[in-house]
Amino acid sequence: MLKLGKKVQYALVAMFHLDRVALPGTRVTTRELSLRYGIPEQHLGKVLQRLGRAGVLTSVQGVQGGYELHRSLRDISLGDVMNAVDGVRAVKKRENHTILTVFPACYVQGLTHEVERNVVERVHEMRLSEVLNPLDIFPSSPKNSLEATG
């Protein structure tokens, strides 16, 4: 079964915020994100650093430092985020599949491997714009207000 871990979830929250909530051209600190979303600052900091090293986010040090998106969500796949944050553990292996016990184990195993392979490929190819844009949990956010008037 494919499962998005906590770190990937933290990354998605941060990226959603940077794309949809933060004002264009502004940077957001780990502390700001941590306080706003109740994510442990230490864990979030590590996630953001990994996204920065992977070229998904840009990190700026200093008084007016923080993080900003390095690329558009259309140019970032869920696989990019999963690999940056979790590395080799990005795709969890299936757990015990007990469905279809009528068929020989080799058939079920082959079938589940093929289904899993297709799901993993699709998930890794998904653009964050596909995943995050349908969410409209901040309809009155400053960025959305600017887009509506501009």
Image (tube, rainbow, N blue to C red):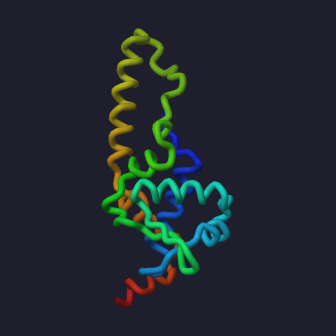
78 in relation to 30, above or below: above
The total number of labels drawn is 0
| Residue 29 falls left or right of residue 2 | right
113 in relation to 137, above or below: above
| Residue 98 falls left or right of residue 33 | left
Q: Which residue corresponds to the image point at 35% horizontal and 65% vertical from the top-left?
A: 71
Q: Nearer the viewer, residue 114 or 49?
A: 49
Q: Outermost residue toward the front?
A: 62
Question: Measured from the top left, where is residue 25 in percent x and y?
Answer: 43, 80
Q: Outermost residue toward the bottom?
A: 149
Question: Measured from the top left, where is residue 112 in percent x and y?
Answer: 40, 24
Q: Nearer the viewer, residue 85 or 115?
A: 85
Q: Which residue corresponds to the image point at 42% horizontal and 67% vertical from the top-left?
A: 69
Question: Measured from the top left, where is residue 148 in percent x and y?
Answer: 38, 85
Tell me the quarter of the picture where residue 149 sits.
Answer: bottom left
Q: Which residue corresponds to the image point at 56% horizontal and 56% vertical from the top-left?
A: 10
Q: Outermost residue toward the top?
A: 104
Q: Nearer the viewer, residue 101 or 139?
A: 139
